[in-house]
Image: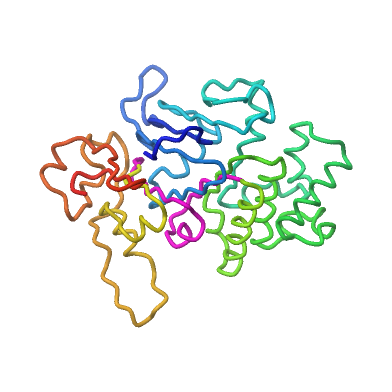
Amino acid sequence: MSSPDSGPLLAVDGLNKRFPIGGGLFRKPTDFIHAVDDVSFRMSAGESLGLVGESGCGKTTVGKLLVKLLEPTDGSITYRFATPAMDPHLAGPVETSNIRSRQLGAFRRQVQMIFQDPYESMNPRRTVYDTIAEPLVVQGIGHVQERLDRVSEILDLVGLTPAGTFLFRRPHELSGGQRQRVAIARALVIGPSFVVADEPTSMLDVSSRTAIMLLMQELAERLGIAYLYITHDLAVARYMCHRIAVMYLGKIVELADTEELLRNPLHPYTRALLSAVPSPDPTRRREPPDILGDLSLPVNPPQRCRFYDRCPLATDLCRREPHPPPEEKAPGHWVACHLA
């Protein structure tokens, strides 16, 4: 859905993920949750792409597919890591479905994930040092003193200073913002090229959220890391991302440069999301979002436009025709809507 790139870091084509429901030992399931449905996009090295939408639209599933925590039902995910790669097996384009056990360790060095809840994603019995050093141990990087030095360095980098006062604390001894910094340090300690950040600020208070956003932006610029930033908050996406992709019921319905999308939203769902963003001006009167009903379950969805049941502009064309493919309405601005 983006302009062709001679060498994107990440190329996602026709990605699908369906989860079976029902069925049994001797009966195949007939119903499927279409969590991700025909998703395609590109990302360049060092780029930040925001994936926004309501809870349940498939954002986190996309993230897990990209880091190989889930396997796709259909479609392809291809990485083109910098050469020479960390491992010769990953030189050139690498399609994740073809990665075997020998290559998986090298893949994990290049692709990492920051989870939404830093407390749930950490072992409460392990110290900060154990948590951050684990990727180094698994990858066989360095000896004990080198790992200690690397963990201390990354703690300083994420703002947990002096590092010596944090190394042997456990998660319950840290604040929410400190735990999130540890989660970021764990993802970055082996120097990845691409990081999926799944709502990394949603569990934090406002002051911690701002600090973490500033930190991630600084680290992206300093280390040249590409982020897929999953969020439901368009204000956060505007601050953090070069481009924004809007997702609804497993489909990307609009994708554009951040300022272009916010200035000129073409899909009615994007416009509804923007109208729901709180205004800091208490005197400003806002109209309610122009959207109908609630998000439906993506179980065996009809072939028509996914937004049809909630769209205030829906016509008989939207009901009759299959979900529209994305079209480039302006340079780099893609939208999947019959009426855009």
Report the magenta residues as a range. 225-251
User: Is residue 68 one of those drawn in magenta?
Assistant: no
Question: Please, is residue 300 above or below residue 272 in the view?
Answer: above
Is residue 29 visible in the rendered structure shown here?
yes
User: Is residue 240 one of those drawn in magenta?
Assistant: yes
Residue at the spot 61% in from the left edge and 55% down from the top edge: 216
Residue that protrudes farthest toward the bottom in the picture:
283
Say left or right for 151 vs 335: right
Residue that protrudes farthest toward the left in the picture:
316
Residue 277 image offset from top left, x and y in percent: 38, 65
Say left or right for 23 vs 323: right
Which image quadrant is residue 253 in?
top left
Residue 139 image offset from top left, x and y in percent: 74, 32
Q: Total marks drawn?
A: 0
Residue at the spot 75% in from the left edge and 60% down from the top edge: 160
Query: As rendered, which of 326 and 177 lies closer to the eye?
Result: 326
Say left or right for 256 vs 133: left
Say left or right for 89 vs 232: right
